[in-house]
Image (cartoon, rainbow, N blue to C red):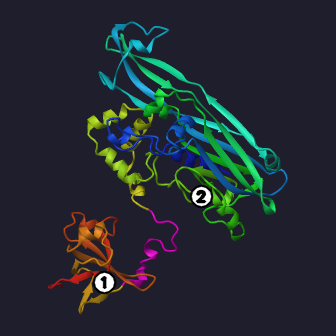
Amino acid sequence: MNPSTVDKIANAVLYEGYILYPYRASSRKNRQRFTFGRVYPRAYSEAQSGAEPFSMQTECLLQSRGTTTALEVRVRFLHPMTRTIGLLSAPAPELPAEIDPGRFSFVPELRIGDKLYQAWQEAVEREIRSSPQVLHSLANRALSMPFHFLSSQTFDPIRDRQSQVIGAIVRRQQSLQGTIHIAAHPLAGEVFKIRVTIENHTPVTAPDLDQPEEVLMRTLASTHTILQSDGGDFFSLVDPPQSQAEASATCSNIGTWPVLVGEKEKSGAATMLSSPIILYDYPEIASESPGEFFDATEIDEILALRVLTMTDQEKWEMSQLDEHAREILHRTEGLPEEDFWKMHGAIRGSKFSGEDFYNPNTRLESVTVLGTDLKVGHRVRIRPQGRADIMDLALEGKIAVIESIEQDAENRVHLALVLEEDPGKDLGMLRQPGHRFFYGSHEVEPLIGNP
């Protein structure tokens, strides 16, 4: 099993929604973050009558292939860290060794020359890993793993153009504590039901229960679990074998969903990722993706083009936010043209590809529509039928030129059309993507006066 394959998917889950386009603190989108996989403090959950969870539970099935079959569990999450900008009442040569935060007046942002200092919510990656646990031993005695991450507060000086300290970047983290429970319940045929429960027991004072930011500071964000077996095979819960269908149905997953991960052909079923984002078995990062955009619900090509169309002022603000935003900006601005073509689209998992579906051998010379013989080069008016999606609405009534007449593998006739008003019409006639539209012969109206 290739750990990098698993970690790529896990990291995409960990940072999903960390920062969204337009990748600036001033964007309303980025004021409510870390929305996936939250495990709240128990005191807050109880104050909300259980509406917000203080635990996350994963259950799945693992078949042992011997008495030494072992299970290793990794729990990962983001530990929120508040970044604020504090100003001193008067400049000083240096920050004092012992500084009282009460000496600062806090502002949303501060600009000095070409630097912009902004308040922001950062995060630190956390991981708790169990040692390999022999399944048969784990079935006799469940494992409990307490964890505790300390609070912290740091001050990085902000200097003016005269190198005097006028303020500080204040980074603050609250302590986090909780427990991970790992259990294995034996079923028939050397199959075990694995249960991993994550609980957040971080204390919260009564006044802080009404402060959303203080609650978030004590919350496990983007929480997910990676389960790996040495000498065992997990069963898919998405598509379990018939022999395990009944047992799979009894698995109770709360706030998360486990799927098989890794390289299917090489690693088999030795690893599961239990994610707060529902995935399919063996998810993959598209090979055409140039890097992380923190928004897997969007299209990389669209996000890259949007970044490039930002104004210089917007790009500058984005570059000042944090290292993640800067990396997106610098990578996108340096993308070669061929990478944009790769992002434009790809067909996978189809028995037909490109020219195979519309085989050149099945191109027709003509087709009869409403009593008129239509050929390549003839003009038609587009009349979409039945689908009424956004492109159909946009193209309704448009005049187009027939670039080719295709017959697919099911003997249906389709017309490849290029809009007459398209400035890139020549690209369409060269069969370039994005400039041709396919419609059935019943979805066009011949125009009088065709050659």
Q: Main secondary structure of the magenta part?
A: loop
* Amino acid at the residue labelled 1: Ser
- The quadrant in which residue 439 appears is bottom left
SS state under label 1: helix
Query: Where does the image place residue 270, in percent across and percent down from the top left?
Result: 70, 54
Which one is in front, 128 or 92?
A: 128
- Residue position marked by numbered label 1 in the rendering: 441
Q: Residues within 10 Å of mark 1 (few under 14, many from 20)?
A: many
Q: Residue at x 57, y 29 (%)?
A: 203
Q: Residue furthest right?
A: 67
Q: Is residue 253 left or right of residue 195?
A: left
Instruction: Check residue 166 in the rendering and tell me which mark sits there, or answer none.
Output: none
| Mark 2 to mark 1 CA distance (whole Å) | 39 Å
Which one is in front, 76 or 187?
A: 187
- Residue position marked by numbered label 2 in the rendering: 282
Q: Residue at x 42, y 32 (%)?
A: 322
Query: Where does the image place residue 333, in percent across and percent down from the top left?
Result: 36, 42
Q: Residues within 10 Å of mark 2 (few under 14, many from 20)?
A: some
Q: Is residue 348 magenta?
A: yes
Q: Is residue 62 left or right of residue 113?
A: right
